[in-house]
Image: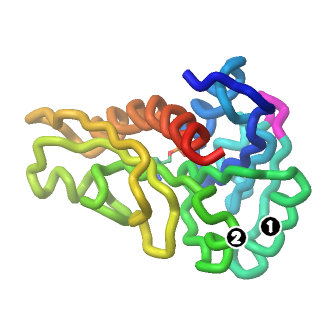
Amino acid sequence: MVKLIGKKINTAIFISGSGTNLNSIIKSSLKKNFPIKVVLIITNNQNAKGLRYAKKYKIKNKFINSKNMAQFEKKCLKELENSNIKLVCLAGFMKILSKKFIKLFKNKILNIHPSLLPKYKGLNTHKRVLKNNEKFSGCTVHYVNNKLDSGKVILQKKILIKKNETELSLKKKVLKLEHLTFPKAIEIVIRANY
Ligand code: GRF
């Protein structure tokens, strides 16, 4: 556990969907010794289920339309600045950020991916993993760089795939693992960089 000397780091979480990773990060962040505070939630999906956690925990949240990514990023940057954000976590955020945006937050944007990267970058991970008869799968938290799911790995956790595993059972198993892994990765990053 990180021993806090100063204040918690203001953090924004970007989501597009169910937001279960958001929930696990918020829950961790409420612990006294956890090094971040979730002060802003940004979504590009007005109907994202995860927004319920913003309401539950009364966290500032913004829907920003991502049809035009340049506009989306411009508005995002304003929000990040207004809330004095020092760390961005992509938790099921389904858009690709530009080089320019990533550069502005160099080593301050983290993403979680449901595979053992560098294997199975991109979408439909579990389906491809099962099709290839892999023995293991897992999840990876990494820094975001200019290539999809390719930034430096911060933390990776592994699980065994059962004989009768289905796409749904694997998804559930990996998601549960993600909920433990993302908060741990955040602690590692803050310890190393802040
Ligand atoms: C997770 O599996 C994450 O790895 C992937 O999208 C899913 C998001 O789930 N990028 P949730 O929105 O956190 O429930």
Residue visible at 85% across and 52% down in the picture: 84
Residue visible at 41% across and 59% down in the picture: 152
Please identify, in this view, whether the residue under mark 1 or under mark 2 is nearer the observer: 2
- Ligand 1 near label 1 (Cβ, under 8 Å)? no
> What is the quadrant of residue 167 in the picture?
top left
| Position of residue 132 measured from the top left corner of the image (x, y, whole percent) | 11, 57
Q: Is mark 2 on a helix, strand or loop?
A: helix
Could you tell me what secondary structure mostly forms the magenta stretch? loop
Residue 20 visible from this viewpoint: no
| Position of residue 37 measured from the top left corner of the image (x, y, whole percent) | 75, 35
Q: Name the residue under label 2.
A: 104
Give yes or no for residue 57 being in the magenta stretch: yes
Residue visible at 29% across and 42% down in the picture: 138
Amino acid type for the residue under numbered disc 2? Leu
Q: Position of 126 compared to 133: left or right?
A: right
| Disc assigned to residue 146 | none
Where is 24 relative to 149, above or below? Answer: above
Amino acid type for the residue under numbered disc 1? Leu
Q: Give the range drawn in magenta.
A: 55-59
1 and 2 marks in contact (CB < 8 Å):
yes
Cα distance between the residues tagged 1 and 2: 9 Å
Where is 38 relative to 4, above or below? Answer: below
| Position of residue 17 measured from the top left corner of the image (x, y, whole percent) | 58, 50
Closer to the chain start, of discs 1 and 2, is: 1
Q: Is 108 in front, or is 89?
A: 108
Q: Which quarter of the figure is the C terminus placed in?
A: top right
Q: Name the residue under label 1.
A: 77
Q: What number of labels is visible?
A: 2
